[in-house]
Amino acid sequence: MSVDEGEAITAQPAAVVAKSAAQTPGQVLRRAREQHNLNVQHIADELHLDTKLVLALEADDFFSLGAPVYAKGYLRKYAVLVGLPPQEMIALYERLTDVPPTPTVAPVASSYQPRQRISLRIPFLIVVGLASLALIGWLAVTLLERFHKTSVTSGDTSQVAAKAVQSPPTTDVPLAPAADVEPAKAAPAAAAPVTSAGSASTNTVSLRLQFNASSWVEIYDGANKRLLYDIGQPGQTRTVTGQPPLRVTLGLSSAVTVAVNDRAVPVPRRADRDAARFTVMPDGSLR
């Protein structure tokens, strides 16, 4: 039974779901699965998930699923598969994850620590700050090297001109042409690094994603700049261009067709899960 066929299961009325308001999303989904005589392996096959993740859903262990957007997506698909309203499951999930812990009347010594929602904002800001510092350091070193090369070239040219003035001219070769030749040779040497640096900065890679089903996608370029952070919808095509290497994360890799520089490439994926993380190299290969 596919997710589309699961939609044929008669959806339970809102009154039935309202009776489960005091329960958790995992408890409601497990009870609905048992009522339809479905096992955990069947649900895992239909959702393209490992059985451990299905058991984590039924145990309300949403931290094992990664970001909240993955948990909500799996809850929606699971609810449709067993004939429950998806929005009701999302409401139960948000109510469960947003309610603060109830304070106790008297302090009780306990080693149990409640799970807290992990915020990705601080680690993201740290990564961006480190990348910015690395970029500033690289620019400083590059400018110092160019300044040093320019200073050495200028010093060598001055020494050659001074020697030409001090040495007596010969009767066969006039002095004026020799002075004209030396500066002409020194000029291209100083301009060469600028041309090379300018051409290297224009190297980019084009990545096209075509979605056959809903899937989470997140893409960063070589400068750690986020190029795409969204959920692709069926029939949608998204194209990004950035400085390689591009770091790509797909929530449902089997639902996405990938092309690099207008060339279709297979998505590397693990055998035990459908999510994929890979890197697009400057030559268009995936790692």
Image: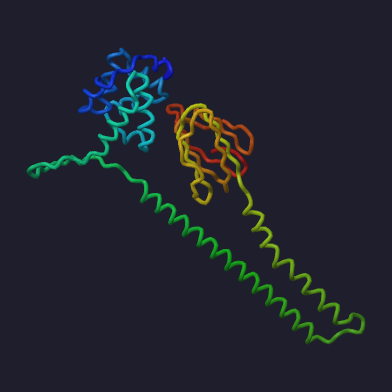
121 and 140: which is toward the camera? 121
Residue under the image location 28 percent in, 16 percent down:
34
Residue 18 coordinates in the image, percent (x, y): 23, 24
Q: Is residue 59 left or right of residue 223?
A: left
262 and 133: which is toward the camera? 262
In which quarter of the view is residue 10 placed?
Answer: top left
Outermost residue, right side: 172
53 and 206: which is toward the camera? 206
Total number of numbered discs in the rendering: 0
Residue 72 coordinates in the image, percent (x, y): 36, 32
Residue 203 coordinates in the image, percent (x, y): 63, 49
Which color scheme does this rendered protein use?
rainbow
- Vertical comparison of 51 with 248: above or below: above
Residue under the image location 72 percent in, 66 percent down:
189
Residue under the image location 74 percent in, 71 percent down:
186
279 and 168: which is toward the camera? 279
Question: Which image quarter is the C terminus in?
Answer: top right
Question: Which image quarter is the N terminus in?
Answer: top left
